[in-house]
Every structure is written in structure tokens, then in C-alpha cells.
Amino acid sequence: MTAINPYSEQAISSPDLMSDAELEQAVQQAEQASQAMAALSFAERAPLLQALAQALRQHRQPLAELMATEMGKPLTEGLGEVEKAAWCAEHYAEHAAQYLAPMHLASDASSSYVQYRPLGVILGIMPWNAPVWLVLRFAAPGLMAGNACLLKHDPHVPGTAQLLAEIFASVDAPKHWLQFIRADHRQVAELIARPEIKGLTLTGSDRAGSAVAAQAGQHLKPVVLELGGSDAALVLEGADLTKAAKVIALSRSINAGQSCIAAKRIIVERSVYPDFVALLQQELAAFTLGDPLLASTKMGPLARADLRQQLNAQVEQSVAMGAQLLMGGQIPEGKGFFYPPTLLTQVTNDMPCARQETFGPVAAVLQAEDAEHALALANDSQYGLAAAIWGPVEQCLALAGRMQTGQVAINGIVKTDPRLPSGGIKRSGMGRELGPQGILALVNAQQIWQA
């Protein structure tokens, strides 16, 4: 396939798929690398991840420019993404030994404990929307656990993937500790079936996750899935409406709204609904569109033309069902796959903009009678990735435990952090990434019993 620059709409040269013979070689090299990584101690692996972090920072500018060119991410956001990826590498370099320390458990043995051993070769299937961060989110814990990694990256970011491959190869680590492969669906399915592949992790749509989970289950492979979301942000009476509007607008607009954990359904109590909508409209209007390579640009284009068409269809269908369009909602003229910040009010939970995942800068505002109604609306979703609640702290904390999501932010933005586990339930995935749970998902918890 040919990747397209979403700003200029010019074609980007893309490398060919690997042949079956080349993939066979990659698998064998990964198997050898997994043995070499497993033989290293945590103290020996940590400098490798620290060197990787340093190499990422040395390539911040070209990586950010590639992301802007290949998927439209504003330059300032791309620079921040690379820094976060480097931080992830450093975090696991520092904390992996602690996270995977043996756990001693009392039993009828003289000594019994659980130790955590590498699985072997981990296959990662990554998307285009955060093409540096998401790689490190899986690779940093995977490598520090003593595994080797095979990475199938999205073909829409070929240059970013190639530079990342060169950065990993530049570190004085066991050869092929992380390899980038170019494969189609058939080849990926055949890889999953191979005995050398001991585990999988995928970030992507719920449709892709279902397909990979079925294949992994058929071959009894452990899998971690971070999938889509229609994240709710609840705004309750007593919330700081000005701050809530600012943060929710930012959450909905980062990466032109192409984020699984963006606030997508904003559920507001009736008593504060009009005031909040006015504030949110004001904040969204500040996100002007422009060239993602310019430092002044706040929002770039969507990554692909088909994604823009799908998003626009969701908006049009929702308006036809009764949603009120307050701003945006039209594909602009001219070059670039731009879509304006869009605000829909009087949204109901059966509309496409609420029922489906909207991967773009569309804020759908629902009205709730009270906090209990807001919670019920939030939980009435096939997704369960993350949520935010804005209001009095004690009330928010009481509601948080009843949210059907893997993550809840109280009076703040939903974000991922190397120190904290992230992941979803329902059609938003299974397993966890990051934090202690993220590395524990990539090891064999082996019980040792000594008479």
C-alpha cells in the first residue's frame, strides 16, 4: 500500500511487505535474541533501556517531523510523545526488578515462592495514532522482562517505523532484541500460530482486537488488548466548570481527537448544562487548524481521508436523529484531511456519536437529570476504557468505583503514565499495560515449591 501525507495529500514511499522467507528469518533471529535477553540480569538490561531512551531523545526532532508528515500530528505534540516514550524506557529500566521481585508465599513447603520468568518472543501489533509512544509502551516492559520483541507497525507510518527500527538497532544490545516486520493479515495470522511466538499485544480497534484474540485463543497464546473507547466525562453540579471545559476540550482535541482515551461523551447535569456548553464551545473554538509541521499549529489534519468520511457520516447521522450542531460538522474545502472541532448538543446515547467510537475532534454533549442518571448513561456503552468525573471530590470518588471502565480520572484529564496501569473492559480490551501490571502481563509467573 501507499501511505499519504494527510496535509499535502501527496504519496509517501512505502516499503514492500516482507516475503515469507524474510519473516521466517526474523522469527528465528527473534528466538535467538530471546535467549540472549533471558540470560541477562535486570542490572544488565537496565543500561540497554537507558541507552535507548537517550537515543530516542537524540532523534526527537526527526521523529516528530515524520509523525507530522505521515499522520498529521502537530510538531509540538510529536516532540512530547517522543519524550514520554523515552521516560517509559527509563521507568522500566529503574523499576522492572522491583516489579518482578520474587513473591514469597506461606505453604506446607520449607520455602515457596513465585518467580517471574520471560516468556520468549512477544509479537506487538501497533497502530498509527501514537507510533512512538505505543511501541515503547509494549517494548520497554517486554524487553526489561527478558523477552525479545517482534513489532508489526501500521503501514501508514513507514518512515517513523523505519527510524525507530534504526534507533533500536543502534543500541549495543543483543542483536535483534526488537525487530520491525512488514506483514499482511495472512502473514500475521501465520506468525501467531508459530510456536516461537509466546505472547501478543495489540493496540487498535475492537474489530482488530476480536480477530487477534480469536487467533491467539486458537493457539492458546496470552494476549493483551488495548482497544477503542467512547469515554465519558461526567460534569456534575459543583464542578469547576471553567477548568472542566478547558481540560475536556483539550482531551477531545489532542491528536485531532484521534485517541482511544479522549473524552468523547460529555455527560452534564441539567443544572449546569447551559453554562458548561457555552464554556466548552469557547474552548473548542481556540483549536485552529494548520500545517502540523508549524510549531504554532494546535490541530493538524486527520490521518486519512476514509477516517474523515467516516467521522463526518457519524456527525450527519447524529444530527439527522436530533442532535444540535453548534459548531463545525462540515468537511472544509481545500487540501488536507482536515475536520474542524465539532460540538454536538442534545445528544442521546443511541446516536452514532455516542454509541460508536468517534475518532476525531467531535464533542458529543448529553444531558443528565442528576449524578445517578449521568452514571447510568456513562455505563450504557459497549466500551469501558476510561472515564473522567468532574465535581465534589467525595461524590466523584463514590461514583468512580461504580464506573464500568479500567481507569477513572477525578477532576483531571485521562492520560497514560508509565507508573500506572492502563487498559479497558468490555469491548475496550483485556489485560493491562504500564505500571507493575504491564510487565506482569509479559512473563511466566512460575511457582517454586521446596520440601
Image (cartoon, helix red, strand yellow):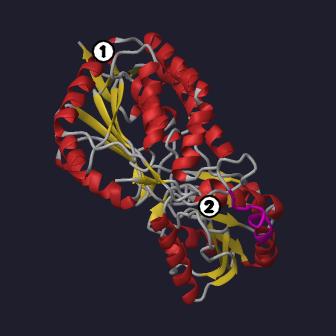
Q: Height in image: 242 above or below 68?
A: below
Q: Which residue is drawn at 63% across and 72% down?
A: 374
Q: Which label was assigned to residue 263? A: 2
| Secondary structure type for disc 2 | loop
Q: Check if residue 283 falls in the magenta segment.
A: yes
**Residues rendered magenta in the picture:** 281-290
Residue 72, horizontal then vertical, whole percent: 57, 53
Q: Residue at x 28, y 51 (%)?
A: 212
Mark nearer the N terminus (2 vs 1): 1
Q: Which label was assigned to residue 36? A: 1
Q: Quadrant of residue 190?
A: top left
| Near-viewer residue (82 or 409) | 82
Category of crowding for the residue at label 2, using alpha-carbon neighbours closer than 10 angstroms: few (below 14), some (14–19), many (at least 20): many
In the rendered structure, which amino acid carries the disc numbered 1? Ala
Residue 344, horizontal then vertical, whole percent: 65, 77
Q: In which quarter of the image is the C terminus?
A: top left
| Near-viewer residue (442 or 327) | 327
Q: Height in image: 55 above or below 291?
A: above
| Near-viewer residue (88 or 372) | 88
Q: Check if residue 419 falls in the magenta segment.
A: no
| Secondary structure type for disc 1 | helix
| Near-viewer residue (310 or 139) | 310
Alpha carbons under labels 2 and 1: distance apart? 43 Å
Residue 322, horizontal then vertical, whole percent: 59, 89
